[in-house]
Image (tube, grey):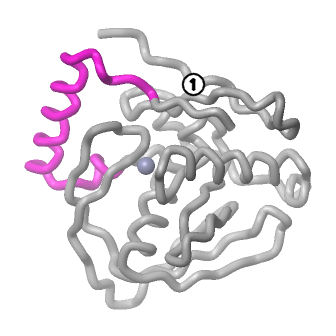
Amino acid sequence: MNDPIVATPFTPSPDEDEREEIALLLFDNPAAKTECRPIDEEDFGSSILIEQGDQLKRAMRLLHGVGLAAPQVGLFKRLFVWQEDDGKATAIANPVLFFPALVEYRNDYEACLSVPGTKARVERAASVTLEGRELTGEPVSFRLRAMQARIVQHEVDHLDGTFFLDRAGPVARTLARAQIDKIKRRGLWRPLRVFV
Ligand SMILES: [Zn+2]
């Protein structure tokens, strides 16, 4: 087995001429299982945190994703971005999910920018309330359903080092693993890279 690929360190690049290439952590890189630390109170509103959020949004758009969590780019903070239904990219820090008293589940396909070329069916709550902070520190709350609820559950999982494949049923997981092995045999198991 090859050595795990180490993600490029993620540092802010406010100057457009100094944009850097970042490599997303692959699912089987042990670092991708890191439990992320909360963002400290004094960091809210800082230019570094706001730029990191903007970089995540740019990376998500350039990679045609609908969500991207900070640990996927080697930044082990409780922060992610996702694309709302109207197309707006939103960043949230220190997110917490609240589930309805009677949870209704939906089973549907998910994919992940850290697991290129693979998808699997995963059961998720059909609706959730997402609470957290804007990067300026303002508290925010979203009531989300359907695809939006699914995306944020997937992203919060990343902050605890959990992948959608960890939540897939045994059959779906076996199929996905076989797909990954096939991609590896073809030499195509490579981290996605993007200039932010
Ligand atoms: Zn993902």
Which residues are the magenta region?
164-191
Residue extending farthest left: 171
User: Could you tell me the amino acid type at mark 1?
Assistant: Ala
Whether residue 188 is in magenta: the answer is yes
Residue 8 locus on image (x, y percent): 63, 23
Relative height, residue 62 to residue 80 (above, below): above
Q: Residues within 10 Å of mark 1 (few under 14, many from 20)?
A: many
Q: Is residue 96 left or right of residue 158?
A: right
Which residue is painted at 33% across and 90% down in the image? 102
Tell me, yes or no, whether the highlighted magenta stretch contains residue 151: no
Q: Secondary structure at mark 1?
A: loop
Magenta stretch: helix, strand or loop mostly = helix
Please identify the quadrant where the N terminus is shown: top left
On the image, the x and y values in percent for residue 72 come to 54, 40
- Say which residue appears at 30% left-offset and 22% top-offset: 188
User: Observer-nearest residue: 88 or 32?
Assistant: 88
Q: Quadrant of residue 136?
A: bottom right
Does residue 78 lie above or below 72 as drawn?
Answer: below
Q: Is residue 3 above or below residue 38?
A: above
**CB at disc 1 and ligand 1 closer than 8 Å:** no
Q: Position of residue 137 (x, y in %)?
A: 83, 68
The answer to whether 87 is drawn above or below residue 43 in the figure is below
Q: Which residue is mark 1?
A: 7
Rendered location of residue 104, percent (x, y): 28, 84
Q: Is residue 61 left or right of residue 3?
A: right
Q: Residue at x 91, y 53 (%)?
A: 46
